Amino acid sequence: MAAITGATLQEQIQKAITAHGVFKVRVGQMVEAGTAEMTPQVAAADNQCPLGQWLYGGLDASARSSPQYQSVKELHATFHQAAGDVVALSAARKRTEAMAALEMGSTFKQSSSKLVIALSNWADAAK
């Protein structure tokens, strides 16, 4: 996965939203296929994906000092904890439970939606 870059914070945030979507789809595909291309620990780590790497090392100090940054960082960590739980279920061959953990209303879906909303709000505030 490519690093998140862009001339403006808004461009970077749009790429971050896309990267998040790619990761989310990847987790779903793993569960569907019953594969284990990542461990639950990697899925749960909020600094391993492109969005996490951007949050922890790709932003300048002014962006990291914004209130939106802290909110996004916390929501991102919550999402990854849920992703780790889903991957753990899949790795334990509990496919039915893993599939249920991907459905609407699940912690995985809710935390993902909240993260995307927070990222979008941050992009709006940065204009």
Image: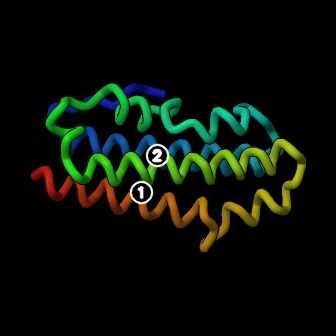
Name the one closer to the observer, 108 or 14.
108
Q: Where is residue 51 in the image (x, y as percent from the top left)?
A: 42, 38
> For the residue labelled by badge 2, is the local secondary structure a helix, a strand or a loop?
helix
Left or right of 10 in this view: 72? right
Residue at 73% from the left image edge and 43% from the top image edge:
30
In percent of width and height, residue 111 lies at 51, 61
Q: What residue type is labelled 2?
A: His
Cα distance in 3D space between marks 2 and 1: 9 Å
Residue on which the image places disc 2: 20
Which residue is rendered at x = 43% and y = 35% of the image?
52
Which dot, 2 or 1, sits closer to the camera?
Answer: 1
Q: Tell me: 30 left or right of 42.
A: right
Residue at image location 70% in from the left, 50% down from the top: 85
- Please tell me which residue is depicted at 48% across the width and 49% down the height of the picture: 21
Residue at the far bottom in the pictured view: 105
Circle 1 SS class: helix
Which residue does the numbered mark 1 point to in the structure image? 115
Q: Do tag 2 and tag 1 residues touch (Cβ < 8 Å)?
A: yes
Query: Which residue type carries mark 1?
Result: Leu
User: In the picture provided, is 71 more to the left or to the right than 63?
Assistant: right
Q: Which is more N-terminal, label 1 or label 2?
A: 2
Q: Which of 93 and 77 is in front in this view?
A: 77
Percent x, y of residue 70: 31, 48
Q: In this view, does 29 lie to the left or right of 53?
A: right
Q: Nearer the viewer, residue 22 or 118?
A: 118
